[in-house]
Image: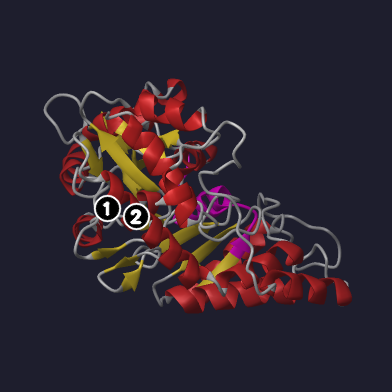
Amino acid sequence: MGKSNDIASQDSAKIYLSSPHMSDEGYEQAYIKEAFDTNWIAPLGANVNGFENELSSKVGAKCAAALSAGTAAIHLALKAVGVGEGDIVFCPSLTFSATANPIVYQNATPVFIDSDEETWNMSPAALDKAFQKYEGRVKAVLVVHLYGLSADLDKIVELCDKYNVPLIEDAAESLGTLYKGKYTGTFGKYGIFSFNGNKIITTSGGGMLVANDEKDAEERIAKVRFWATQARDAARWYQHSELGYNYRMSNIVAGIGRGQLRVLDARVQKKKHIFEFYKRELGQLDGIKMMPVNDWNEPNYWLSCITLNGKVKPLDVMIALESENIESRPIWKPMHLQPFYSECNFISQCESGSVSEEIFKSGVCLPSDTKMTDEDLYRVVNIIKKLWR
């Protein structure tokens, strides 16, 4: 294999977990230049409108609101379905804190739901248990598509319909992921996407809230935009009858997003190549298991993740890669184990312990940067393989 078999030295170029990747064609710069040329720099503009229309068209949503962050999108989705003080919201435990925090912004109470081994996402069995325990008290269900893997949506949607509770999809990590041929983020009443710097496409920061059901979608998104622009009433003077937020996306940021959206499919293909490379090179090592990809799920493979259940531990892998200037990280620490949320209720799929805890303890996110070459990938796997010698 030549150079591809050489273990890298500390002086080798850094390999990132998942860094921004602008298009080779310069799509982003063209949209930004247009914004400068027309002097639409900060407040809204053609790029914002275009990004909303183009993204909603891409995923098959009815309409969209471009916002300052995926967290802002979750916050306004919760507000839009009426979540308020004292309400209960079901949320997966195995997720980033940005999923759970907006529940608290609304003075509501999160109840954390365990994962299942088949998807790493919200367990329908645990969700059913939670509905039975809190029947009549639940205001919303937040489902996450972790690392680009879709949750078992048919079962989750069925349970939400059964108990007449709105579903919000946190698809921050799964833009471009298909569940049975339909894009994630379009199954719930609202879906959210993130364009943070490490996501599959980025605007440097930003998010999108999409409305999916036909009934009053445009009107509901208009209300979200109203809240996101400080809830300014239609008056000659500055008048505010509701609490508002400074959550709208700028025209420059949206221009980056429009350019990035044009290379989304190519980014998904590269992420898949990275996953398949790791699966081929590492999948046969004793104790390694790749993250689950089901027949009905076409992930965007945002991060390629493994679990280890043998002599080599997750920390061994992370330290070995770190010593060679390569980024990796643990799986998300479950919310019910976080100090801030330690008093919140947790509904486990298991009689004892939890699936989410086991995934956290045994998991590693491997570098999944779309700028990686095959030589970079060989560098990563050769370092990991050395731990088995």
Answer left or right for 287 relative to 326. Answer: left
Looking at the rendered structure, the secondary structure element under dot 1 is helix
Residue type indicated by callout 1: Arg
Residue 274 horizontal/vertical position (percent): 40, 56
Q: Which residues are magenta?
A: 66-87
| Residue 297, quarter of picture | bottom left
Q: Is residue 268 visible?
A: yes
Q: Give me the residue at 40% from left, 35% from top.
A: 383
Residue 292 place in picture, x, y as percent: 24, 50
- In the figure, is residue 351 to the left or right of 190? left
Q: Which residue is mark 1?
A: 280
Can residue 172 be seen at all in this image of the molecule? no
Mark pair 1, 2: CA separation: 5 Å
Let me know if residue 149 is in the magenta part: no
The residue shown at (59%, 51%) is 196
* Mark seen at residue 277: 2
Local packing at callout 2 (Cα closer than 10 Å; few below 14, some 14-19, many 20+) is some
The residue nearer to you, when weighing 233 against 73, is: 73
